[in-house]
Image (tube, rainbow, N blue to C red):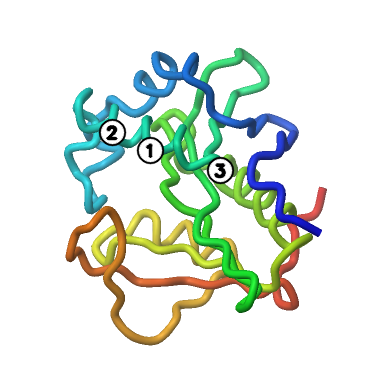
Amino acid sequence: MAFDLQPTLNGPRITIRPITEDDWSGLFTAASDPEIWAQHPAADRYQEAVFRQYFDDALESGSAFVFVDREDERIAGSSRYYGLDPAASEIEIGWTFLARDYWGGSYNREIKSLMLAHAFQYVDTVVLWIGVDNVRSRRATEKLGAVLRDGGHRHREGTDMPHVVYEIQRSQWHPPAE
């Protein structure tokens, strides 16, 4: 069965759907807060020209999403699947961000649980690459039950920024109770 890289996934509060060109304004509004990117390797992504490259890359990827708040239809953030490796039965969830209104609660868990449940229909392992200094994202990933892979890693956008890699195995993942 071929991995569906851009499904529409519905949770209680968030709809995850494929990104479109029409999402530019809403997604840039969600991303234009410098605090979102403060711990991220691309700390200037709140700037329009830098974010435009992120947005264009997301459209081109064929595997990117926006998160839509079901209550008010506001775009809350974005993510994508990346690097499907059928031989290793592995895919990455990455390039994720949430507007600050969605921090500190259970939105990240809802979003990642929907994406993980979908991915585990096709692969055994999901990985998440995170900038080594992005403590906020690392903590959120650990709350999902992801474990740190050994070693240092370099990845992303042609930079030499150090990253850590977390993984979640289908056999060890427990979806949150409804």
Q: CA distance from mark 2 to mark 3?
A: 16 Å
Query: Residue 177 at x, y = what percent?
Result: 80, 54
Residue under label 2: 53
Residue found at x 60% / y 15%? 73
Circles 1 and 2 in contact, beta carbons < 8 Å:
yes
Query: Residue 59 at x, y = what percent?
Result: 46, 32
Residue found at x 55% / y 35%? 65
Circles 2 and 3 in contact, beta carbons < 8 Å:
no
- Where 30 sits versus 139, above or below? above
Q: Quadrant of the N terminus?
A: bottom right
Residue under label 1: 57
Q: What's the residue type where badge 3 is placed? A: Ser
Q: CA distance from mark 1 to mark 2?
A: 6 Å
Residue found at x 65% / y 73%? 89
* Mark 2: secondary structure: helix
Q: Residues within 10 Å of mark 1 (few under 14, many from 20)?
A: few
- Where 114 sits versus 51, above or below? below
Residue under label 3: 63
Q: Residues within 10 Å of mark 2 (few under 14, many from 20)?
A: few
Residue 149's label in the rendered image is: none
